[in-house]
Image (cartoon, rainbow, N blue to C red):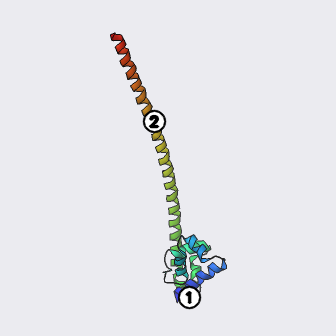
């Protein structure tokens, strides 16, 4: 029964915002069939989907539980879950920015290494040229 109310609330939110199942599936980065299972099928709703759907619909997770009086005792736990989820999202965002920064730094270091390798090659060539000149000069002196 609870799942039916949850599924009904999810569908109502989607329809109230004039969104298609296909559009929501794209936003969730999943298939239309998977989203269809969220609204109608066997997919467990107390999972990663509820926080993601709450974000898409711009609602609090608790709004999915409207009409389920027995669950009102769990409102604090749901708020805690939402807070935890949001903190993890922020943490992931910070980590993604740090990864991007490290990738840029890595690319810069690769470019710098290439410059140094080019300089080393040039210096080796110059040294070889000098050795050839010295060898020619030594031969000239011997004559």
Q: Residue farthest to the bottom?
A: 1
Q: Residue at x 50, y 74 (%)?
A: 48
Q: Could you say where residue 62 lies in the image, as x and y percent from the top left?
A: 57, 79
Q: Residue farthest to the top?
A: 143
Q: Residue at x 55, y 82 (%)?
A: 39
Residue 134 seen in the current view:
yes
Q: Residue farthest to the front?
A: 143
Circle 1 residues within 10 Å: few <14, some 14–19, many ≥20: few
Q: Could you say where residue 40 lies in the image, as x and y percent from the top left?
A: 54, 84
Q: Could you say where residue 89 lies in the image, as x and y percent from the top left?
A: 52, 66
Residue 79 seen in the current view:
no
Q: Quadrant of the C terminus?
A: top left
Q: Is residue 103 above or below residue 39?
A: above
- The reply, left or right, for residue 99 in relation to residue 62 is left
Report the residue marked by disc 2. Answer: 118
Q: Secondary structure at mark 1?
A: helix
Mark 1 / mark 2, whichever is N-terminal? 1
Q: Secondary structure at mark 2?
A: helix
Residue 82's disc is none
Please name whichever residue, 138 or 48, is drawn nearer the observer in this view of the structure. Answer: 138
Q: Residue at x 49, y 47 (%)?
A: 107
Q: Residue at x 52, y 90 (%)?
A: 1
Quote the CA–CA distance across marks 1 and 2.
Answer: 72 Å
Label 1 close to label 2 by CB (< 8 Å): no
Q: Is residue 143 above or below residue 65?
A: above
Please name whichever residue, 54 or 20, is drawn nearer the observer in this view of the structure. Answer: 20
Report the residue marked by disc 1. Answer: 69
């Amino acid at each position: 029964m609870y799942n039916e109310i949850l599924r009904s609330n999810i569908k109502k939110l989607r329809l109230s915002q004039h969104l298609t199942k296909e559009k929501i599936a794209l936003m969730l980065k999943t298939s239309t069939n998977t989203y269809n299972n969220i609204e109608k099928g066997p997919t467990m709703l107390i999972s990663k989907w509820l926080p993601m759907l709450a974000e898409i619909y711009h609602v609090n997770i608790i709004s999915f539980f409207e009409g389920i009086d027995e669950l009102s005792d769990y409102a604090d736990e749901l708020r805690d879950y939402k807070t935890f989820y949001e903190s993890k999202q922020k943490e992931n965002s910070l980590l993604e920015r740090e990864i991007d920064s490290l990738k840029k730094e890595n690319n810069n270091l690769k470019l710098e290494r290439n410059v140094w390798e080019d300089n080393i090659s040039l210096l080796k060539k110059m040294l070889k040229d000098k050795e050839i000149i010295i060898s020619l000069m030594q031969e000239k002196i011997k004559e």
